[in-house]
Image (cartoon, helix red, strand yellow):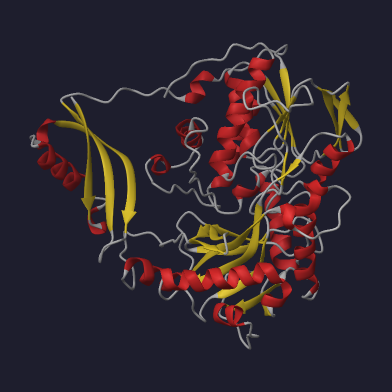
Amino acid sequence: MRNELELKIKPVHIQNIDLITEMAADKLQIKKVSITHLQILRKSIDARGKNPVYRLRIEVFQNEEPPVEARFLDAIKPLPSNSKSVIIIGAGPAGYFAALELLENGVRPIIFERGKDVRARRRDLKAIQQKGIVDPHSNYCFGEGGAGTYSDGKLYTRSHKRGNINKSLKLLVEHGATEEILIDAHPHIGSNKLPNIVANIRKTILANGGEIHFNSCVTDFIIKDRKMLGVVVNRETEHLSDSIILATGHSARDIYYLLQKHKVQMESKPFALGVRIEHPQALIDSLQYNQHPREQNLPASSYRLACQVKERGVFSFCMCPGGLVVPAATAPGEIVVNGMSLSRRDSSFANSGTVVAIDPKELDVEVDDEIFKGLEFQKQVERNVFLSGNGSQAAPAQRLTDFVNGAFSNSLPSSSYIPGLFSAPVHELLPSFIYEYLREGIFKFGKKMNGYLTSEANVIATESRTSSPIKVPRNKETYMHEQIVGLFPCGEGAGFAGGIISAAVDGQNVAKAVCTYNGVALKQITN
């Protein structure tokens, strides 16, 4: 017999499985000895009351054992040399999970990634952090695993209707992630552990007949009579395929210009831009948990804030408790910041993007093609912020209270940002309308979360890569571009995802569509 129930338990007891079993038996009014297995299905923190508690959803097995679940990797077998092949551009979550899905269905993925593998990538990240040197092909956004690999590894998504999220999470577990990601309400891996998982996914792809080519930037498409025929890599070699999955991420701006060159239909889309705000983690803990220091079994606390200012959204984005602020520029001459956390989330800082929603159509930017308004606006802000500094990746910053009051900060609080901060009038560096909306939004956040608006927090510019301002449209049923036969836009760069898991799920969906396009019968695997 199986039963599902919900329990509430104090943090101090969250590791006590024996106590949890007793509580489950009492609630079901059964004997504890009759419980043969207890499975936690979901775990979340409820901090709304005076003292935080864990809420658990549990499945209890009485006088029976749980069924043995099949592993998704067991469905992947080495492919014969004459298998149908599909080109994937990009080795981020969309590209890699598309590759796994293709292999599962007997199709060979051939992946071209402009950046380096996860291990080699680390040297370029160190160069950005310590020397301010930005490699335009290997950085926090480009390289194996995509932007999420070294910028946090958060797995939370609200895209539950878009595909098999559980499959994506289980594939991560099968490649080395802890099973905690299957039950946590806001699952997280961490930038110290995700690279090894990504490397394991690469090994699976290669071991089963796939190909992965690093340092391989797609510099042209081969299109004839509105049909995809292949790609040109590094301006030298042609690689032919009539099926191309475009999974390049939100910062591959050159791809959009390449699509424009071939007159491939694109659309402008809303995006967001603002700053990253960094507080002491202890302060956020005291505001969210009503305790200082926080209990040992409670994780670093987070927050999610949103409001409307004159009918425009202002909201926190990519909140990183116990995290670090990192330089996320993808080209010299720009300042872009992002956030990350290691698996333990044990930094003494908490940071979050705080951004303003923007419709590109309302921007006053001179461009040859209206589609590029948002992208050019991003560029202008990033360059302007860079020019305020000394030519390094040091970022301009301001105390939060000074930012909202439009005052220069004579000193700055400590920060996790390794390239360093310098005091600057961030309120003047940003476009005036962005500043005004942020200012009003932060005032409202301070009322929602008493203590948030503090001089202990830094405002760091600029948070500009929340998503792509351009969408590469596709048919809702076939996932193929409406005009270019054989082109399958995918993931964040195409405008269809917003994070690791949503990109992974989109990659799986697109891969299935590619199989159907090529007459390959899909395997039906449930788990």
In the image shown, does 12 or 228 lie closer to the viewer? Answer: 228
Of 118 and 357, the residue lying toward us: 357
**Quadrant of residue 281 within the rendered picture:** bottom left
Residue 249 horizontal/vertical position (percent): 69, 43
At 79% across and 53% down in the image, what residue appears? 373
Q: Residue at x 55, y 33 (%)?
A: 505
Find residue 387 and report its horizontal and vertical position in percent: 81, 72
Q: Is residue 55 above or below residue 282?
A: above
495 versus 62 height, above or below: below
The quadrant in which residue 429 appears is bottom right
Count all numbered tags in the image, as a single digit. 0
On the question of residue 16 being in view, the answer is no
Percent across and percent down for residue 190 are: 51, 51
The single residue placed furthest to the bottom in the displayed view is 410
Considering only vertical position in the picture, is 38 above or below 316? above
Q: Is 322 situated left or right of 461 in this image?
A: left
Q: Is residue 162 above or below residue 396?
A: above
Give the position of the C terminus as an image quadrant.
top left
Quarter of the image with the N terminus is: top left
Question: Percent position (x, y) of residue 430?
Answer: 71, 70
Can you name the residue that lies furthest to the front here? Answer: 310
- Viewer-nearest residue: 199 or 507: 507
Q: In the image, 223: left or right of 359?
A: right
Residue at screen point 64% across, 64% down: 274
